[in-house]
Image: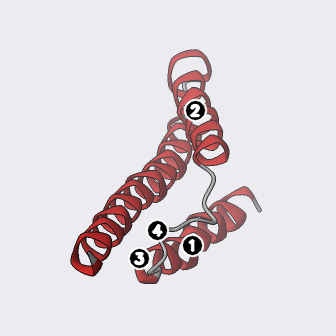
């Protein structure tokens, strides 16, 4: 069951990532705090699994979750910066 739900969980990040990629409003609905906490939790779990439990599978999937969280955060940063640039350009063009 763990393997099945771990796979589903990894795949479930894709719709969120696609929504952010398509978002034209700076991904304003994404919370940096929430995704950063999830990133930290997944990295901590991966390290604990690798170092203390010697559980390669848990370390691997937790690291994968962490990568997905990092992608969400990085893509959100990119979208927000691009949105701000567009807004600033629109404001200077309107003057």
How far apart, in angstroms, are the residues tagged by discs 4 and 2? Answer: 23 Å
Residues at marks 3 and 1, CA–CA distance in whole angstroms: 9 Å
Question: Which residue sits at x=47%, y=80%?
Answer: 23
The residue wearing badge 4 is 26
Task: Give the crowd class for mark 2: few <14, some 14-19, many >=20 residues within 10 Å.
Answer: some
Name above or below for residue 24 compared with residue 2. below
Residue at the spot x=44%, y=81% of the render? 24
- Residue farthest to the front, as pictured: 95
Helix or strand or loop: what does disc 3 sit on? helix
Q: Find numbered disc 1 in the image and state the secondary structure of the residue it sits on.
A: helix
Indicate which disc residue 21 carries: 3
Which dot, 4 or 2, sits closer to the camera? 4
Earlier residue among tags 1 and 4: 1
Of callouts 3 and 1, the N-terminal one: 1
| Dot 2 or dot 3, earlier in sequence | 3
Task: Describe residue 48's horizontal placement relative to residue 81 as left or right.
Answer: right
Q: Residue at x 54, y 24 (%)?
A: 54
Disc 2 to disc 3, C-alpha distance: 23 Å
Q: Nearer the viewer, mark 2 or mark 3?
A: 3
Whole-percent x and y of residue 88? 30, 65
| Neighbourhood count class around disc 4 (C-alpha, 10 Å): few under 14, some 14–19, many 20 upward | many
Residue highlighted by disc 1: 16
In screen coordinates, is 94 left or right of 60? left
State the image quarter where residue 4 is shown: bottom right
Q: Residue 16: x, y in percent?
A: 57, 72
Q: Which residue is mark 2?
A: 40
The C terminus lies in which quarter of the figure? Answer: bottom left
Q: CA distance from mark 2 to mark 1?
A: 18 Å
Q: Nearer the viewer, residue 36 or 27?
A: 27
- Closer to the chain start, of discs 2 and 1, is 1
């Amino acid at each position: 069951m763990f393997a099945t739900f771990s796979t589903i969980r990894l795949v479930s990040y894709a719709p969120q990532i696609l929504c952010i990629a398509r978002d034209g409003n700076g991904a304003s609905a994404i919370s940096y705090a929430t995704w950063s906490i999830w990133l930290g939790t997944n990295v901590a779990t991966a390290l604990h699994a690798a170092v203390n439990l010697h559980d390669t599978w848990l370390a691997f999937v937790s690291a994968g979750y962490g990568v997905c969280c990092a992608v969400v955060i990085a893509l959100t940063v990119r979208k927000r910066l691009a949105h701000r640039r567009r807004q600033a350009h629109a404001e200077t063009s309107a003057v």
